[in-house]
Amino acid sequence: MITSTRRVSPDKSEVRIAFSLDNTSDVKDVEDLSQTFPDLEQRLQPVPPCVSLRESVQVYKDHCRMAREFHQVKHEISTLEDCKRKLLAELVEDEKVAVEIARLEEEFRHLTEENRTLVTVHNERAQQLKKLCLTNQTRQNSS
């Protein structure tokens, strides 16, 4: 690999030219070699390859691909954990609602039973009143 850096004129930026007599078509752009992955610890960052060795470039590309996959999986895990938190919150709320429903059902059963009892007592008292009125009326008629 032959690399040359030249400044065409003092007011122009440097121009970098790189070429190799070997078949190193794996290296398409020098800019590709400066990828960083903020999710990775420093010790796990891909190390730029020795561009004259095809195996080194391939290992670097594989490492970068795995780093991108790691980022994607980490993002998916984060998304799923958020979803899990939301579902757990909904579950807690649903459990509270279920407890409230059970309490209301029990209260309804109790009130229904109390209502039946009151209706029965009311009917009994109405019958007793009717009998008393009839008894009272027969006493008044016999007097």
Image: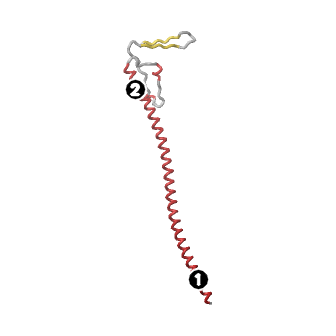
> Image height check: is 75 above or below 3?
below
Q: Is mark 1 on a helix, strand or loop?
A: helix
In the drawing, what numbered circle is on residue 62?
Answer: 2
> First in sequence: mark 1 or mark 2?
2
Work out whether residue 94 or residue 92 is closer to the camera in this orientation and state it: 94
Under circle 2, the secondary element is: helix
At label 2, the amino acid type is Asp
C-alpha distance separating marks 1 and 2: 105 Å
Seen at 56% across and 81% down, the residue is: 131
Q: In which quarter of the image is the C terminus?
A: bottom right
| Callout count | 2
Tags 1 and 2 touching, CB below 8 Å: no
Q: Which residue lies furthest to the left in this view?
A: 55
Give x and y (percent) for residue 116.
52, 69
Q: Which of 2 and 112 is in front in this view?
A: 112
Q: What crowding class fits label 1: few (fewer than 14 Cα within 10 Å), some (14-19), or many (20 or more)?
A: few
Q: Where is residue 20 in the image (x, y as percent from the top left)?
A: 41, 13
Please identify the quadrant where the N terminus is shown.
top left
**For mark 1, what is the residue?**
134
* Res 9 → quadrant: top right
State which quadrant residue 60 falls in. Answer: top left
Task: Give the foreground label among 1 and 2.
Answer: 1
Q: Is residue 44 left or right of residue 120?
A: left
Q: How crowded is mark 2: few (under 14 residues within 10 Å), some or many (20 or more)?
A: few
Give the residue at x 54% y 68%. Answer: 115
Q: What amino acid is found at the position of numbered circle 1 in the picture?
A: Leu
How far across and down, in percent of the image, does residue 4 sit?
47, 12
